[in-house]
């Protein structure tokens, strides 16, 4: 049902303008990503800090890294003994559990974040996908407006590597084609990939959608203001992850895997006071 979509960089015939043909919600309201116009955001004093459970230590693994042909995903939900949950921060009750994180990137010299602040894109954007613990499955969560909460983190390029990305980036060379999964050599504290040494950054908040088909309007988005640094060479590793290709071919690298920005419509973006 959602097998036929792609990014324009892969094939314009199945790119974002065609997504609504296979998933009607992609042409519907409350879509993501968006540009955040900082003059129009409304400060909301109820947007208190996040409460993170289990993000400060390396949980039992293994964590699996997967190339799904559209991005690279790190599956961090390995069962009840390694529960990663967040609350507070204006999130609906009772809590949201971390399932996976994945990335959107550009191409050589081209920024690839999905969101932007005052029109400013960043080289990459990381999404940590969480599911409301009141729902039993992803399918059920995707059918409810409060089903999912995604933390969006901008990645800013610097000359030196960020060691907190080392375990993940070393796995990239092993997810050599669509459908290939590998176990990471080690887990690490999720907080080490969040801004401000544990998500203490100011954040922006709005109701939106998944940024890939089916584009369900089931996501409470948090976009952190502060970027997390990543090394130039590490960004290049993402930009050389291969996409699917015909058998025996040298598949082209997966690049520019971000959705075009969507109209805000009648929605409001709020800002935490921090
Ligand atoms: C990527 O983005 C994957 C998807 C994800 C989608 O294509 O990470 O993950 C899986 C497991 O298919 O979709 C349902 C879901 O998490 C959209 O996620 S996003 O809106 O955060 N970009
Ligand atoms: Zn994403």
Image (spheres, rainbow, N blue to C red):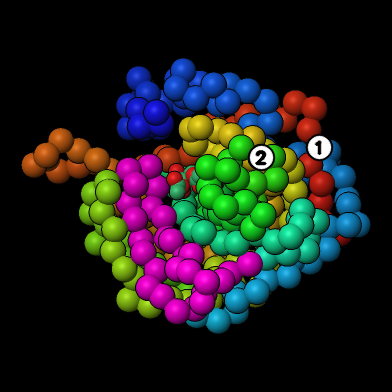
* SS at circle 1: loop
Q: Nearer the viewer, mark 2 or mark 1?
A: 2
Which label was assigned to residue 144?
A: 2
- The answer to which quarter of the image holds residue 26 is top right
From the viewer's side, name the closer residue of 120 and 30.
30
User: Which picture quadrant has residue 267?
Assistant: top right
Q: Secondary structure at mark 2?
A: loop
Circle 1 is placed at which residue position?
Answer: 268
Which residue lies at the image location 38% right of the left edge and 53% below the top edge?
Answer: 72
**Where residue 144 sits: x, y (%)?**
66, 40
Front in this rendered view, residue 172 or 148: 148
**Quadrant containing the C terminus in the rendered view:** bottom right
Specify whether residue 62 is painted magenta: yes
The answer to which of 14 and 236 lies nearer the viewer is 14
- Residue 266: image x %, image y %? 80, 27
- Quadrant in which residue 246 is drawn: top left
Question: Quick check: is 204 in the magenta stretch?
Answer: no
Q: CA distance from mark 2 to mark 1?
A: 19 Å
Q: Which residues are magenta?
A: 59-85
Q: Is residue 172 positioned above or below 31 on the image?
A: below
Position of residue 145 relative to residue 98, above or below, is: above
Is any atom of residue 116 visible in this view? Answer: no
Instruction: Residue at 29% x, 58% y: name it.
Output: 181
Left/right placement of residue 8 relative to residue 164 reads left
Q: Is residue 12 left or right of residue 138?
A: left
């Amino acid at each position: 049902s959602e097998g036929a979509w792609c990014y324009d960089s892969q094939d314009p015939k199945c790119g974002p303008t065609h997504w609504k043909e296979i998933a009607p919600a992609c042409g519907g309201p409350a879509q993501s990503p968006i540009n955040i116009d900082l003059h129009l955001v409304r400060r909301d004093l109820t947007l208190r800090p996040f409460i993170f459970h289990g993000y400060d230590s390396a949980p039992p693994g293994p964590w699996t890294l997967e190339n799904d042909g559209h991005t690279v995903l790190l599956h961090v939900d390995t069962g009840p003994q390694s529960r990663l949950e967040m609350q507070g921060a204006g999130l609906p009750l009772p809590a949201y559990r971390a399932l996976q994180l994945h990335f959107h990137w550009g191409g050589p010299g081209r920024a690839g974040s999905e969101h932007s602040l005052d029109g400013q894109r960043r080289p990459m954007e990381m999404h940590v996908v969480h599911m409301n613990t009141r729902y039993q499955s992803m399918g059920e969560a995707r059918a409810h407006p409060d089903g999912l909460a995604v933390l969006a983190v901008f990645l800013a390029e610097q000359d030196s590597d960020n060691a907190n990305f080392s375990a993940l980036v070393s796995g990239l060379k092993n997810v050599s084609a669509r459908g290939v999964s590998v176990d990471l050599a080690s887990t690490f504290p999720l907080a080490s990939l969040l801004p401000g040494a544990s998500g203490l950054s100011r954040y922006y908040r709005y109701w939106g959608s998944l940024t890939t088909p089916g584009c369900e309007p089931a996501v409470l988005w948090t976009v952190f203001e502060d970027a997390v640094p990543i090394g130039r060479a590490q960004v290049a590793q993402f930009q050389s992850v291969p996409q699917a290709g015909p058998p025996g071919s040298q598949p082209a690298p997966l690049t520019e895997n971000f959705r075009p920005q969507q109209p805000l419509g009648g929605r409001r973006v709020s800002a935490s006071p921090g």
